[in-house]
Image (cartoon, helix red, strand yellow):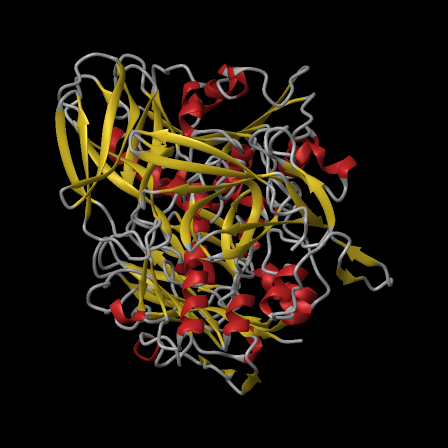
């Protein structure tokens, strides 16, 4: 063991009868490992590769980590903590300082170094590991989510061995702590999702959420919360918390005794039977109905608790007023976004969260959060359907460009402020999406993220009013990004306004978003009724993300995730529908604006004319293109690809998904399967404020988890749920090989990510598979949670992925519309 590693500072904290030691490290080793992670499936991490293959040697000062292609040795170097216990290990000190989350709170740790620490425990025991900073870590070889935004709330239960315990942290700046606590169940109040109490509102049973850690060696499922507010108690069962796990769980409280505005103490007791396992007090705000407030809801994505913020309409809510959806910038809370707006006399401002202050850049699950909140706000505030608007700042400016182009019929007008159009041009926290590649496999992976390329969708703005606001002195998001979009719009758009605020930096006060001319521009615009829109021009990269525009829906594509376009004209007098399509196989047309018993002529792509006689005044018509011929079909089979179940792999993490872990393969295989599932659950919590059930294959049954997506971990030999769920899947993974179609790869170091439709319902199965322990360790990385990263329907790889990048990928691609494996949709080396 290195002489630099065992030095620890022990801080003893006593609370009542509970003793707690917080151990901070003083010295460590670091190495410029050259790891590279970004917004794509391809990454490199030599240390992770060495660890997976059992080739990682115990670090020592000036010891060799690796030898580069140039023959130079990469060495472990000693570093010391500063007075606060922080380690700073920049391999490029002069250029990375601004990414230090301790010097620039809220920014991301992009360090590619690894920092090595060890702790010698006098006995076997459990502890809480809290590492502020760092992207990810390995504790005794087990992967865990880091804290790249230095939020401080990753309280991870770990098992300490007697003797040396090793900790490898990937990142530039970290503050690592081990917390030894007599209590096995702990409430953590550093990441609370809570609502506001609105005085004189009828709803008084409210929901919040906070994290609970279980440091015991048993799953705990018979827990409940007891909350007390102003003497009024409320009880609710707590979701099961796995052994050595943390989870964000929902509580309820009764606000009936709160009658005045102010801050109130809410006592939260975690009960294990009749025993109070832990208790904490949190602050709940009570507000007048005219104040900006938070409102919580249970998300359909994963069953977790989320919130949105509201700036109420001036003078109180009125039906048939306007609705403004505002999407915030990186590091900004939704309530802060809402409070930047003064109340409007003609509408309500609603701010979604993106699931976290950084979340998913308003793409992927951030996009879904925005749509969930939009749906809830419409139901609650009942706005005029023609007066729904979208705006946002910085990352939310990107969100405005993205959501506006993806769903152009949902908005009367959009207003990006200090925004950038594409993650290919502006990287934000996880870096940029690569723009292109000469490698056929990487091209396939990048194609799976085509929805992020907003400039390719720019003509979708034709029907929208667009107001662009940007400070001309902005150094965070330079004004060149606004000028780029102004130039693109100038080529075809006749209804946009552009303003550069003189001397305006990235934030020049609340008027950076609450800009009067912007809202005046909104007032001039409304969404035209579908009956009045007889010309359609719409582009999408995926019907699974965006399929419909007005009275037409792209149901299926000829080439998955390539851009599809429809340009259609409707003549209600003739009556007729004509137009052209690109990359469309199945098209659905709503004929609601035609009368019953009308003969309609349909001519697409210059091919033969189809005649259809309507049966009612609200018919829908499905058309399928085969062999250069359009024909009328009854509809699309439930099992086929279609909007709502179209792929890609990332789509499986939805519909209250449950993680099902294989435990049939022996202790080691079961352990690495569980480690991977728990790492994904931690990452989902950190990135998406989420919560997920993690169960074993023996606990799973299709009837119990009906109506939910399923994520399987393991393979056909070690996961008992596999055979029933993946019986017809063309991808087969066992302990010794992977087969896909006529392709076979053998070895114990293979991994796979893929999806498959559930039988007899509309939901999906996501699969994280491996041929052996080395293979599952090679699948530990979860770049699929990075906003905008592209993962196709399936991806097969070896452990060389983490060492050689794209050279480690064996196969990637898409199923056809019947979920068949076809070579034309696949890429191989």
Q: Residue at x 44, y 78 (%)?
A: 820
List x then y, in percent, for residue 648.
47, 62
* Residue 292 vertical placement versus 131 (above, below): above
Outermost residue, front side: 122
Write the residue at 42% across / 67% down: 671
Q: Where 38 sits versus 228, above or below?
A: below
From where the camera sits, is residue 555 visible? Answer: no
Quarter holding the C terminus is: bottom right
Give residue 329's position: percent from left, percent from top. 52, 31
Does any portion of residue 417 appear in the rendered image?
A: yes
Q: Count the marks.
A: 0
Residue placed at 29% from the left, 29% from the top?
A: 16
State which quadrant residue 552 falls in.
bottom left
**Quadrant location of residue 323?**
top left
Residue 627 position in % (x across, y down) = 49, 77
Left or right placement of residue 694 versus residue 747 in this view: left
Q: Position of residue 220 (x, y in %)?
A: 25, 53
Considering depth in this image, is 294 or 412 the residue closer to the camera? 294
Quarter placement of the N terminus: bottom right
């Amino acid at each position: 063991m290195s002489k630099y590693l065992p030095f620890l500072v022990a801080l003893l904290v006593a609370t009542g009868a509970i003793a707690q030691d917080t151990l901070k490290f003083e010295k460590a080793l670091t190495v410029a490992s050259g790891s590279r992670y970004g917004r794509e499936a391809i990454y490199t991490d030599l240390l992770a590769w060495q660890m997976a293959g059992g080739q990682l040697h115990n670090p020592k000062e000036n010891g060799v980590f690796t030898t580069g292609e140039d023959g130079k040795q990469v060495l472990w170097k000693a570093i010391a903590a500063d007075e606060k216990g922080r380690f700073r290990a920049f391999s490029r000190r002069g250029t990375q300082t601004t990414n230090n989350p301790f010097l620039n709170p809220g920014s991301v740790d992009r360090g590619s170094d690894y920092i090595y620490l060890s702790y010698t425990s006098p006995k076997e025991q459990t502890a809480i590991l809290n590492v502020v900073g760092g992207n990810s870590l390995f504790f005794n070889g087990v992967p865990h989510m880091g804290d790249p935004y230095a939020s401080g709330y990753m309280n991870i239960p770990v098992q300490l061995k007697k003797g040396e315990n090793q900790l490898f942290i990937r990142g530039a700046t970290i503050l690592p702590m081990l917390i030894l606590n007599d209590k096995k169940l702990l409430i953590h109040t550093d990441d609370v999702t809570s609502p506001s109490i609105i005085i004189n509102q009828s709803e008084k049973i409210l929901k919040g959420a906070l994290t609970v850690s279980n440091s015991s060696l048993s799953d705990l499922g018979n827990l409940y919360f007891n909350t007390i507010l102003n003497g009024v108690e409320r009880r609710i069962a707590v979701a099961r918390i796995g052994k050595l796990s943390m989870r964000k769980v929902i509580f309820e409280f009764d606000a009936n005794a709160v009658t005045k505005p102010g801050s109130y103490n809410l006592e939260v007791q975690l009960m294990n039977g009749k025993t109070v396992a832990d208790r904490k007090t949190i602050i709940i705000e009570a507000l007048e109905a005219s104040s900006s407030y938070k409102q919580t809801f249970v998300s359909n994505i994963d069953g977790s608790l989320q919130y949105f913020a509201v700036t109420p309409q001036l003078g109180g809510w009125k039906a048939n007023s306007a609705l403004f959806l505002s999407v915030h910038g990186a590091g900004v809370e939704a309530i802060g976004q809402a409070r930047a707006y003064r109340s409007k006399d003609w509408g309500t401002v609603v701010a979604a969260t993106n699931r976290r202050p950084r979340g998913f850049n308003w793409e992927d699950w951030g996009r879904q959060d925005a749509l969930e909140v939009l749906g809830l706000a419409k139901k609650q505030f009942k706005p005029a359907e023609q007066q729904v608007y979208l705006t946002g700042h910085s990352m939310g400016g990107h969100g405005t460009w993205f959501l506006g182009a993806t769903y152009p019929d949902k908005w009367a007008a959009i207003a990006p402020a200090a925004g950038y159009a594409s993650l290919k041009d502006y990287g934000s926290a996880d870096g940029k999406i690569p723009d292109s590649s000469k490698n056929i496999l990487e091209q396939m992976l990048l194609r799976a993220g085509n929805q992020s390329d907003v400039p390719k969708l720019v003509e979708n703005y034709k029907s929208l009013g667009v107001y662009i606001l940007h400070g001309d002195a902005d150094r965070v998001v330079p004004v060149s990004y606004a000028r780029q979009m102004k130039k693109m719009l100038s080529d075809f758009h006749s209804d946009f306004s552009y303003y550069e605020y003189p001397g305006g930096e990235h934030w020049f006060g609340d008027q950076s978003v609450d800009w009067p001319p912007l809202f005046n521009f909104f007032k001039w615009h409304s969404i035209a009724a579908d009956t009045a829109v007889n010309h359609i021009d719409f582009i999408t990269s995926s019907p699974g993300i965006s399929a419909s525009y007005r009275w037409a829906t792209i149901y299926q594509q000829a080439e998955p995730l390539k851009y599809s376009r429809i340009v259609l004209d409707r003549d209600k007098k003739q009556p007729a529908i004509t137009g052209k399509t690109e990359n469309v196989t199945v098209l659905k047309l709503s004929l609601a604006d035609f009368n019953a018993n009308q003969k309609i002529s349909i001519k697409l792509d210059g091919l033969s004319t189809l005649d259809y006689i309507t049966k009612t005044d609200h018919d829908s018509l499905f058309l399928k293109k085969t062999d250069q011929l359009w024909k009328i079909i009854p509809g699309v089979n439930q099992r086929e690809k279609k909007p709502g179940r179209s792929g890609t792999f990332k789509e499986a993490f939805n519909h209250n998904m449950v993680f099902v872990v294989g435990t049939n393969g022996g202790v080691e295989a079961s352990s690495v399967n569980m480690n991977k599932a728990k790492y994904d659950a931690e990452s989902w919590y950190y990135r998406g404020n989420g919560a997920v059930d993690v169960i074993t294959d023996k606990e799973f049954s299709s009837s119990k988890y009906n109506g939910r997506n399923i994520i399987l971990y393991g393979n056909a030999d070690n996961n008992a749920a596999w055979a029933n769920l993946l019986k017809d899947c063309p991808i087969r993974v066992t302990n010794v090989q992977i087969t896909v179609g006529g392709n076979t790869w053998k070895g114990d170091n293979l991994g796979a990510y893929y999806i498959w439709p559930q039988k007899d319902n509309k939901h999906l199965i996501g699969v994280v598979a491996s041929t052996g322990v080395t293979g599952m360790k090679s699948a530990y990385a979860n770049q699929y949670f990075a906003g905008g990263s592209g993962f196709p329907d399936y991806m097969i790889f070896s452990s060389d992925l983490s060492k050689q990048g794209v050279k480690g990928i064996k196969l990637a691609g898409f199923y056809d519309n019947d979920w068949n494996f076809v070579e034309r949709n696949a890429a191989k080396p």
